[in-house]
Image (tube, grey):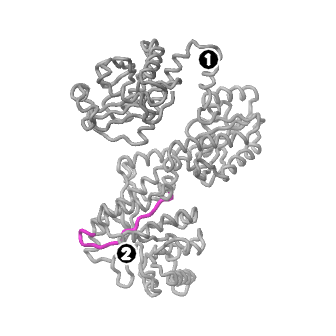
Amino acid sequence: MRLSRDATPGEDGGPASDLEEARLAEVAAYCPTMGLPDAEFDHVVELAVALFGVSGAMISFVERNEQFFAARRGVDAARTPRSQSFCAHALDRISPLVVEDALLDPRFADNPLVHGPPHIRFYAGAPLRVSSGAALGTLCLINTEPQGFDAHQRRLLESLAGIVVDRLELRRSRHNSDTSRRHLAKLAHTDALTGLPNRMRFHERARQVLSERGAGALLLFDLDGFKDVNDVFGHATGDRLLAAVGERLSGLIEDDHLLARLGGDEFVILLGGGGDARQAYRVAESLRLSFQQGFVVDGQNLQLETCIGVAMAPHHGETIETLMRHADLALYRAKAEGGGAVGYFEPHVRHKVEARRSLQSELTLAFERNEFELHYQPQVRLSDRKVVGAEALLRWRHPERGLLPPGVFLDTLETMPLSARVGDWVLRTAIGQAAHWLSAGARLRVAANLSPAQFLTGSLPDTVAAELARHKLPASLLELEMTERIAVKNTAAVASMLSGVRGLGVGVALDDFGTGFASLSLLKDLPVSRLKIDRSFTKDAVAGGQDAALIEAVLQLSRAFDLDVVAEGIETAEQAQLLTDARCSEGQGYFFGRPMPANDLLALIGGGRA
């Protein structure tokens, strides 16, 4: 039975009545198991209601004259006439049928189920298409209010429908031949995407290996950058990437190595040798270096890195459960080092790793509870000491430890996916604050720091443009700051996104300039409008000294490239005067003002103290 995405009975494969009779025969074949209680069906509809935030969900089977529900939530009736069924309209589709507002759809506007219980305004139904190609019914969602339904939600609904279909097939196959039962057993122990052993099978075989040999090495790793692939290219590409990773890893391991996919982007290898740490490192390095080739998926050259955590048996544990736990700690430590590191479990660092994980959990809760806030440090024009701008600096209002500076948490935050969301929040908040200052009569440029994660999605120029438009803020009053460390990591991609930002009229400042991360070629490669002289040069600067000479060199360089300059870390009148005499345009530091709440900065300007 071949169906196009929106095919109707009779378009391909004979008269509509023949197709429908064949479908009804399949419904009858599966129906004998429908009277059996199945907690999994109940779990699916409960999960669907929770995931999609709807008023009801059903597993519906459409017979000749009516439909019945094998499981339901939010609906009282166990059966409804087929003539009133939304689900009947979804049977001839491949993709889900979505009705965002039933009152606006002529097929359903007069339906009794719309105007009476369960008062359906929104409907989404994914066909339950079994192995023969016939659709028995649907997994459907309903809501009493109209709503949208995006592509991600459609895929999620299709995945849940697939679970229902799998359960139906398992029920029908219960009394099949020994061959079918062996096939199902294999499916239960095999990862569907990669064909590798799954978590259950890995644990079974690992226990056997460890009990027989008593020694081995466990290598645990995940894919750095995989989430970005899913976000940018979609989950279908992500799935094919996982399959490609599994294929490559399979070609690298020896016959006595046990490779498995544990789930998500997490893989594991058990080396069943004599627990040789040097061999474990050689294998880990081979795996890590293999990722440098990239993966071509759907015409895209996708680059990933992997960090690997290693635990040795029996030194780090005698059971697979202990080894997995300790390899996970080693992986966590390796990821903190960055750059595709290989880390071994060390008992003395366990508390440090666990403390870092605890901090990550706290940071996630802090973001959800709106505990982050911005303080603003004034930036002063040195010629007349007028405040012309402010740098937005992140602070954490911890419920127990009080106001925390970024040095306490920023390194940990930048290793988390949360980093991009916090960075976008900083950007939005800073733009909104600059707009508020402008409406209060203070025309101040605000500088917002960018996190490395904000360059991964490719949406930075669009985000900036949208926020400027929303707050009606002139682009000249926004400046984005990044460190040399970010700039050198992927100069081409960073330059492309910053060019988009500069095209809006927004300034770009290179922070920590001169601290040694980058070469001078960055000034040619990046669309920078301002340099920030690092505080390490200003804190000990005296006339005629080496630091003063370095400052003068940076200032001459900035003039050659037609760049503005802000000198950070000015703490004394002597430093301020030295920089003024050197014709540095702007300064920032405790001498002019510490980071402060937005209202305090406005009061400072009004009071004329800078």
Specify start and end residues of the magenta stretch as a single range: 438-452
Nearest to the observer: residue 157 or residue 321: 157
Instruction: Give the residue drawn at x 65%, y 40%.
Output: 246
Instruction: Give the residue drawn at x 66%, y 48%.
Output: 342
Q: Is residue 449 above or below residue 527?
A: above
Which amino acid, by three-letter code, is at mark 1? Answer: Arg
Determine if the magenta segment contains residue 24. no
Quadrant of the rendered structure where residue 247 is? top right
Which circle's residue, 1 or 2, is located before the other in the chain? Answer: 1
Q: Is residue 465 above or below residue 343?
A: below
Determine if the magenta segment contains residue 446. yes
Nearest to the observer: residue 43 or residue 321: 43
Give neighbour class at mark 1: few <14, some 14-19, many 20+ (Cα, 10 Å). some
Left or right of 546: which side holds 499?
Answer: left
User: What is the CA distance from the residue labelled 1 to the residue labelled 2?
Assistant: 77 Å
Q: Please, which residue is most extreme toward the front here?
A: 15
Left or right of 242: which side holds 360?
Answer: left
Q: Quadrant of the C terminus?
A: bottom left
Nearest to the observer: residue 268 or residue 463: 463
Q: Position of residue 85 (x, y in %)?
A: 32, 25
Q: Which residue in the protein does label 1 denote?
A: 181
The tag on residue 592 is 2
User: Given this view, does label 1 or label 2 mark the residue nearer the observer?
Assistant: 1
Give neighbour class at mark 2: few <14, some 14-19, many 20+ (Cα, 10 Å). many
- Is label 2 in a helix, a strand or a loop? loop
Instruction: Give the residue drawn at x 48%, y 48%.
Output: 231
Left or right of 437: which side holds 208?
Answer: right
Which amino acid, by three-letter code, is at mark 2? Answer: Phe
